[in-house]
Image (tube, grey):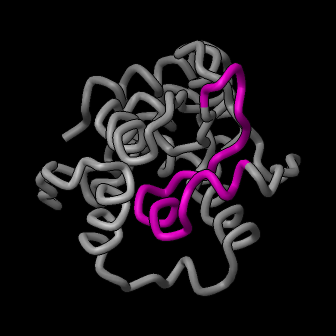
Amino acid sequence: MPQKNDILIGQLLINKGIITAEQLEEGLREQKKTGHFISTILVRLGFATQEKVLTTLSEHLNIPYLNLKARDIDPLVIKKVPAKFASYYKIIPVEIDNNVLVVAMIDPLDVRTLDDIRLLLGVEVRGALSSETEIQEAIHKYYGVGVLNISGNFNETYSTLCDGLKISNVPYDPGDL
């Protein structure tokens, strides 16, 4: 079933002339079958480019869109986030701006993930929009080949991070993530 946000995103793309109403309807029908995000479906069907969809969302939400392919990230910034953590949350640290860590993520409105990052790393965090593909490629580029296939126990990593931050009494429930 289409969600309210799916129709909003679709309407934004129609208003900008990127897709037609018919293409949105076809995308929504496909979404009912697959359950994927409407923006992903519209790109996969060839109705819109990923960059146009993300740029439209970025403008509407007033959240920066970061093209990670066109950016070199300082290794000192990368070191702020452990590889397992970046892989698990599908984020990539991009820069430190006025003592705030900027992370590229698929959904920069995901308050829960931002709060988890803030808690576990002990820094202020601001999300920026990027595509899942670009984030995965950046994780691979900056952290190495094996990080995308990490099958380690995240609970162990979480506990280690919590111990280091003196917050070991915080319970971890994978269902909360």
Q: Quadrant of residue 157?
A: bottom left
- Count of picture labels: 0
Check if residue 82 falls in the magenta segment. yes
Relative to 139, residue 5 above or below: above
As drawn, 78 above or below 37: below
Look at the image and tell me in which quarter the N terminus lies: top left
86 or 35: nearer the eye?
Answer: 86
Residue at the (25%, 48%) spot, across then down: 167
Q: From the top left corner, tell me how far across and down residue 32 is, in percent.
A: 25, 50
Magenta run includes residue 119? no
Q: Quadrant of residue 59?
A: top right
Using residue 58 as the reference point, say whether residue 149 is left or right of it.
left
Q: Position of residue 168 (x, y in %)?
A: 20, 55
> Where in the figure is residue 11, as x and y percent of width and height?
47, 19
Q: Is residue 55 left or right of residue 81?
A: right
Please name the residue shown 31% across and 71% down the image: 154
Is 43 positioned to the left or the right of 3 in the image?
right
> How far across and how far down the image is residue 50, in percent?
66, 45
Q: Residue at x 44, y 39 (%)?
A: 122
| Placement of 112 over or under 124, stated as above or below | below
Q: Nearer the viewer, residue 171 or 110?
A: 171
**Which of the 4 quarters of the picture holds residue 142?**
bottom right
Q: Closest to the observer: 49 or 62?
A: 62
The foreground one among 83 and 91 is 83
- Residue 113 relative to residue 19: left or right: left
**Which region shows up in magenta?**
77-100
Q: Residue at x 62, y 56 (%)?
A: 135
